[in-house]
Structures are given as C-alpha cells and as structure tokens.
Amino acid sequence: MEKKYPNLCKPIKIGNTYYRNRMFGAPMGGTDITADCTIGRASTAFYENRAKGGAATVTVSELVVHPETEGSHMFHLDLKTVGALSSFAYTADAIRRHGAIPSVELSHSGQYAGTYLTDKTIKGSLNQWGPSDWTRPDGLEVKALTEKLIQDIVKAYGETAGLAKRAGFEMIMVHGGHGWLINQFLSPYFNHRTDQYGGSLENRGRFAQEVLDNIRNAVGPGFPIEFRLSGSELFEGGYDLDEGIEIAKLLESRIDLLHVSAGTYQRGFGQTHPSMFLPHGSNVYLAAEIKRHVKVPVATVGGLNDPEMMEEIIASGKADIVEMARALLADPKLPKKVMANRADDIVHCLRCFTCMAERAMTATRRCAVNPVIGRELDGMEISPAAVSKKVLVVGGGPGGLQAALTAAQRGHQVILCEKAAQTGGILVSEQAILFKQEMYKLGTTLTKLAQDAGVEIRCNTEVDKEFAAQVNADAIIIAAGSEPIVPAIPGLDNEQVIIVNDYYLKKDQVAETVVILGGGQAGCEAAVHLAMEGKLVQLVEMREELAPDANIRHRPLLLEEIKKQGVVVKTSHRGREVTADGVLCEDQDGNQILVPGKTVIFALGQKPRREVVDTLLDAAPEIATIGDCVKASTITTAIYQGHHAALDL
Ligand SMILES: Cc1cc2nc3c(=O)[nH]c(=O)nc-3n(C[C@H](O)[C@H](O)[C@H](O)COP(=O)(O)O)c2cc1C
Ligand code: SF4
C-alpha cells in the first residue's frame, strides 16, 4: 500500500533497537500509583491503550530515581521498593506485546518535588532539594544538594535504569527538561553553585553528563537512551536557544535520541504544553535549530496532531521523530490511522487540558473526546451486542453523536435525528472562534465516524412523541442538549444583542466596540477571540472572578490571554439593562455605570432542554438521557455518558 505519509510511517533504528514508525508516545503520568510506589493496573491499561494504537514507543513516567531527596511526592513510582519490579514488568509486557517499544522516564523533580499535587502539605515538613538554596515563590525552602547527595542521585539513576532494563523496558528517557532537577542544574537562573556543578555551561552540564554515564554503565552499549531537553527555558534569565544548542552538543555523545521540548512547567506551562491559544507545532523551531548542530537523531514535541504537519516536519528535516502526548489520549489509534491512510478518521485533541486538570481534581485521568481514557480497565474494546436493537438518538451534539457511534459499532440499527440543519450541536458555534476550530471539527469527525459505522443521520428533524411512535425504536437515547439562559434583562431582545452561540452566524454584524455580558468560560473565550480580531472588548461579570467554570489548567491561561489581548474586565458588575450605547450595570456599591459598546454579546450560561426529555420519557421500552439535557455540563460529560448509554443497550 502506498503510504500517504511515508516519512511518518518510516521505521527508524535508534541504538540497537528498531521502531515501527516515527510517531512516539511522549511521557504521561499514570494515576493509580500504589502506596508502595508501584504501577497500578489502571495505569498499565492506560499505557497499553496507546501501544495498541500503533505508536512506536509508549513512555511510562515519571519514575522517581531518588525518593530520599524527592520526599514531598505523595505517591510516586519507585523501582527499588518490594513488589515494584513485577509491576514494571507487567507494564513493559503490556506495551511490548502490541509492538511498541516500552520506555520509561527517569526523573527527579528537585526543588519542584510535589508542586503539582493537590495536597502539598501532607509531607510539608520535608524540604525540597535543588542546585542552590532559595525560597520558592510559595514559601517552601529549597536546600542546595551537597556533593555527596549529588553523587547518591547520580548513582540512583544508574541503578534505576538497570532495574528498568531488567523489568523489560527497552529504552530509557532521561527527563532533563521542563524545570525538573537536571534542568535546574543546567539553568543559569536556578544554579548559583560555585563548585564543579555550577558556573560555566560545562559545570552546569556536569550533573547531566554524570547521570548519563551512570545510566550507560548500567544498560550497556546500544541500549537506547533518550534525553528530554527544553530547547530553551523561555523565560528571562533562563537559558535560551543558543545555550540549548550548546547543551545539546555537550550531551550528544552520551545519548541516542535528543528529544527537544520547551520551557518549564512552572514558568511557561502553556508553552511546554502548547495551549489552544498557540499555533500547532509552536515548539518545532527549537528542535529544528538544534538539529542543525548535532548528529544524533532529534525528536520534537508540543501541540502536534495533524499528520500533514508532522509529515512535513520529518520530510523537511526539522526533526527525525514526532512525539505526541495529548493527541494520543484523544485518539490512541492515531498512528494506526496514519499508517492505514485513514487520517480523516482521527479524533483530534482540543487542547482543553481536561486530562491534566482531572488528575488534580480526582487523581484520575479523563479526556474530553475519548470516553475510555483513565477508565481503560472498565473496557477498551467495543463488543457486539447480543441482540441488535433499533435505537433512536435524539440530538446530534457530541453526546448524541458518540452514543450513535458506539451503538452502531455494537451492531445496533441507529437513527440519529437532529433538529438543526447540521449535526454538532453546540460545537457548531465554535467554528468562528479562531482557537476552537478543533471543537467544531470534533462534530464533523464524529458525524463521519457515525455515518461510516452505519448510523442514519436525519437533520432538520425534530423528534416528538408521534415521531418516536412512528420510528418504534427499542431504545431512545435522549441527547437534546441545552439552550442559552436568557434572563429578564430589559433590552436583551435589542437588535445589537447577539447570543454567544449565534456569533458564528452574525459575526459580520459585530461592531468595533463590544460588551460581553457573562464572564464564564464561554464569555471569556469569546472576549479573547474578539480582541484578537481587533475589537475593543469589555467583559462584564457579576461574580468576583472570571471563568470559575474553566478547569484549573485552562483557566490561568485563559485569564492570561484576556490580559494579553487587552480585554477590559468589569467583575462584580451586574448587567441591568441593554441600551443603544451599551450595558447599564450596577457595581457592588450599587452605582449605576454604563459599559459602552455598540454590540452586546451575552453568554449567561446554558440550561437543559428538559421539555424534550419530559416529552419522550415513555416513548420507548428503553430510555436513556445524557449530556446537557440532563444538566448543562461539558463535552467530556456528554461524550462519556453517550458512550456508556450505548454500551448499556
Ligand atoms: C496528561 C499528561 C501528563 C503528562 N505527564 C508527563 C510526565 O509525567 N512527564 C513528562 O515529562 N511530561 C509529561 N507530560 C508532558 C508531555 O509529555 C508533553 O511534553 C506535553 O504534553 C506536550 O505535548 P502534547 O502537546 O503532544 O501534549 C504530560 C502531559 C499530559 C497531557
Ligand atoms: S482532555 Fe482535552 S487536552 Fe487532554 S487529550 Fe483530551 S482533548 Fe486533548
């Protein structure tokens, strides 16, 4: 078969190991790390899912090498505890049996140990260790590692690598980027040592070199060692790309693959994990520049999910390998689809950060667009139903589409009715927001997948009791979605007022000055978009803070963008009336203030379409209600509930 993406699909040899393609699975931490520091079964399944999907590697992370100096982690992986070896062996097997190379990331967080955990106080009395003494912005004391401790850590890297190899891992990734310990040593901002580990670049790189030498001694020649480096720290005072190149040159003789990432977790989270506000592939330039200066193969990472773009990166020699994290949660089968010339079937990552936020909230993973993620043990495969049923799905939003897709994959006869002219539901309105194109595309991709699976889609079709009776379905899945809340504010029916959901239809009518009424996530994102379009935007919110409904990873980046784009924010302002000149508001002291703007966009939340549910509740022997029509919520909830309603049939 002639490959549409020949470079992406081409095998590569690194060290003594062959890799089946150029699409590598970037490290992502599992969640059910046990109290005795081993990989839980759920995490093994989490990693196995991506191996099955065709990635060339799956990287288990973050294996802590020296818990004695990383004591503020609540739970961490440690290969030296009793029972750990077998859990690592099971995980390596689970990855290897699907043809992917099992890799494990060896890590030490140094002065940031535990910063991303929800409860940092549990072992708050243990201090953090870094290259130099200082006090972190959150008040925690960091102590400089002694030379003795440095040597202990260096030795621990080697011992851990040896154990990982024994467990069945066939590659080691050394985490030398993102602000963790090796990066802290490399950084002129954090490393103020005056001994052989500080000062000149060679001295700052000594720790990394010793770590790599010890790992090499433990794993032997030819065993692939990948080094993850931030090509630039991307903040003032940190090392820049020029120094990144020198670091790469310093280390290349000791490694088999240089993985060039970007920035730091603490000072550039939205660049290290490129947010939806950045273009795809925003960090590729770092890898491309470094690649010009080294002979070792180079990998790039960050916001990559489009096969066309990834093919071009390799074809043009910017990198030899592309690595993906979130894209392989959204669609673990992405590599298989690329290899089979089925790129149109890829479900793309939205860069919404639900996956990362969920860990902080519930200590699990979830993915907005993939209902299986973080719940792999509940079943990854869709098995055929014992009896094929006639299923009517009411509503073609994300939840309805997912329900229809899963039901059809199980062999049911599925009719999906959507009252609008096109499927997608609330996602349709995202098409006009520059940085939310992937949300719009989610609707079109799910529609295609559902149709390919045999779902009959009927648009412009409203389902009432009579219609349902005619269809005579065995089961109805009601996914009727939600509608905008329209409060009793005088003037909301004025001509210059646009509901945020209708913005895509009326965007040409938007004047140069805009007031957005409602500072939840939808209002904030509309504000950012309009400001990017060059409009003068004022954002009015009656609560004290913006976007409390946004997840904890996306929210800070959204707020940062609001600031960056110059949106004028009026919190604690209650909209009282829309006039021809703007919105008359009342502030917290009861003062009347006119917030001027020629167009008013309101984004005051959504409410369930409960009446559709009530009408259809007894319209078939089996009824399920899912998504926004139950409770206005998220894409994540709609897709998860849709998938499971279909599995329950
Ligand atoms: C859920 C999740 C968990 C992650 N965990 C780790 C980790 O444990 N170690 C690490 O080095 N990077 C981790 N990362 C960062 C990714 O490896 C990757 O560098 C980053 O997400 C950018 O790639 P992407 O845009 O393809 O997601 C994680 C990313 C995500 C989304
Ligand atoms: S949760 Fe959102 S950001 Fe994370 S992988 Fe899924 S779609 Fe992408």
Image (spheres, grey):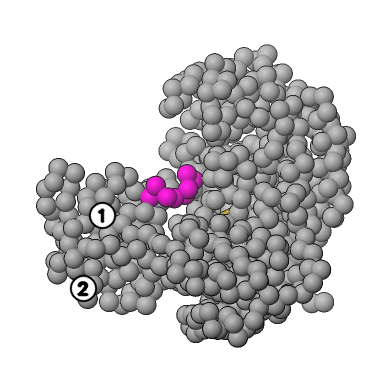
**Which residue is labeled 2 in the image?**
494
Q: Image quadrant for the C terminus?
A: bottom right
Q: Is residue 553 magenta?
A: yes
- x 33%, y 74%: residue: 507
From this viewpoint, is residue 617 visible?
Answer: yes
Q: Position of residue 371 (x, y in %)?
A: 64, 57
What residue span does the magenta drawing correspond to? 547-554
Q: Position of residue 517 (x, y in %)?
A: 27, 59
**Which residue is labeled 1 in the image?**
540
- x 56%, y 63%: residue: 626
Q: Position of residue 394 (x, y in %)?
A: 56, 74
- x 42%, y 45%: residue: 556
- x 59%, y 82%: residue: 469
Q: Is mark 2 within 8 Å of ligand 2?
A: no
Q: Image quadrant for the N terminus?
A: bottom right
Q: Is residue 170 above or below residue 427?
A: above
Q: Quadrant of residue 112?
A: top right
Q: Is residue 379 above or below residue 582?
A: above
